[in-house]
């Protein structure tokens, strides 16, 4: 994966995203759609995992069959909204190691404030996929990637549901070596730092909070 930004334009991704954007979509349906769309996004972000082979025996014969190579990859959820993408990805990659970075956005400065960080070991030997539904200002995402690199991660990808041009530019400036995979690149940020047209606050819509 060499491009800095990949927009997943698969018809199922785009259809489910439209349903998630609608203001009348219920919390339960929003949560289910996020889990479903994360399966499709996980397929894209893991497209170039390293492979090797091992000898197996089918009911008919022996063969050299492809299997994943190297250490188990690591999924890192940027709390709290990242957990919605994380749950769906773990359906497909149940053996992945899981980490959490707790960041919240100071509403006055729009800067990230860290309150929690727990990461798997040997990050330098793993593909690390950081997940957060929204790449808005990019400040929280950049801070999370900073923490991953400080912990030794060298091969990192960032997966989100929606991105704003401002966030993509901020990530590219701070971490040009980290590809971003998203379902949509939206128009802009508003004066409050929310993505427009967006889908509102992903965490609130996922958990039914205000």
Image: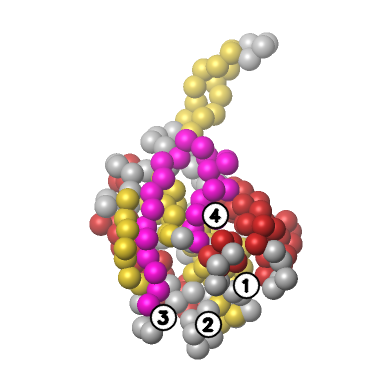
For label 1, the residue is 199
Mark closest to the chain's N terminus, 2 or 4:
4
Q: Badge 3: how crowded within 10 Å, few (<14), some, or many (20+)? A: few
Q: Secondary structure at mark 4?
A: helix
Q: Secondary structure at mark 1?
A: loop
Q: Is residue 40 above or below residue 136?
A: above
**Residue density around tag 4, few if under 14, some if 14–19, many if 20 or more, within 10 Å:** many
Dot 3 lies on which element? loop
Residue picked out by circle 2: 189
Measured from the top left, where is residue 172 in percent x and y? 41, 70
Q: Is residue 127 visible?
A: no
Choose the circle earlier in sequence order: 1 or 3: 3
> Does residue 201 sit above or below 14 in this rendering?
below
Residue at the outermost front position: 209
Magenta-drawn stretch contains 106: yes
Give percent across and percent down for residue 15.
74, 62
Q: Nearer the viewer, mark 3 or mark 4?
A: 3
Tell which tag, 1 or 3, sits nearer the viewer. Answer: 3
* N-term-proximal mark, 3 vs 4: 4
Decide: is 64 above or below 90.
above
Q: Nearer the viewer, mark 2 or mark 4?
A: 4
The quadrant the C terminus occupies is bottom right
Task: Tell which of 142 and 33 is nearer to you.
Answer: 33
Give the residue at x 51% y 37%. Answer: 94
What colour scheme governs how the chains and residues are painted in the rendered image of this protein?
Answer: secondary structure
Front-most of 3 and 18? Answer: 18
Residue 12 relative to residue 157: left or right: right
On residue 85, the disc is 4
Q: Is residue 169 left or right of residue 164?
A: left
Total marks drawn?
4
- Residue for point 54% across, 86% down: 190
Q: Which residue is under mark 3? A: 107
């Amino acid at each position: 994966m060499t491009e800095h930004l990949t927009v997943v334009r698969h018809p199922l991704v785009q259809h489910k995203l439209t349903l998630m954007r609608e203001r009348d979509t219920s919390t339960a349906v929003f949560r289910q759609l996020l889990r479903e769309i994360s399966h499709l996004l996980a397929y894209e972000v893991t497209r170039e995992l390293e492979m090797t082979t091992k000898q197996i025996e089918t009911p008919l014969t022996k063969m050299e069959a492809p299997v994943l190579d190297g250490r188990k990859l690591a999924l890192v959820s940027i709390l709290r909204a990242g957990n919605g993408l994380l749950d769906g990805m773990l359906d497909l990659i149940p053996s992945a190691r899981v980490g959490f970075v707790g960041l919240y956005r100071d509403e006055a400065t729009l800067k990230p404030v860290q309150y929690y960080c727990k990461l798997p070991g040997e990050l330098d030997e793993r593909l690390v996929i950081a997940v957060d539904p929204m790449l808005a200002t990019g400040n929280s995402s950049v801070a999370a990637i900073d923490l991953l690199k400080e912990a030794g991660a060298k091969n990192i990808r960032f997966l989100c549901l929606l991105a704003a041009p401002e966030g993509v530019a901020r990530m590219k400036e701070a971490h040009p070596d980290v590809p971003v995979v998203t379902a949509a690149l939206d128009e802009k940020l508003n004066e409050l730092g929310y993505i427009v047209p967006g889908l509102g606050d992903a965490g609130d819509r996922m958990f039914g909070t205000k």
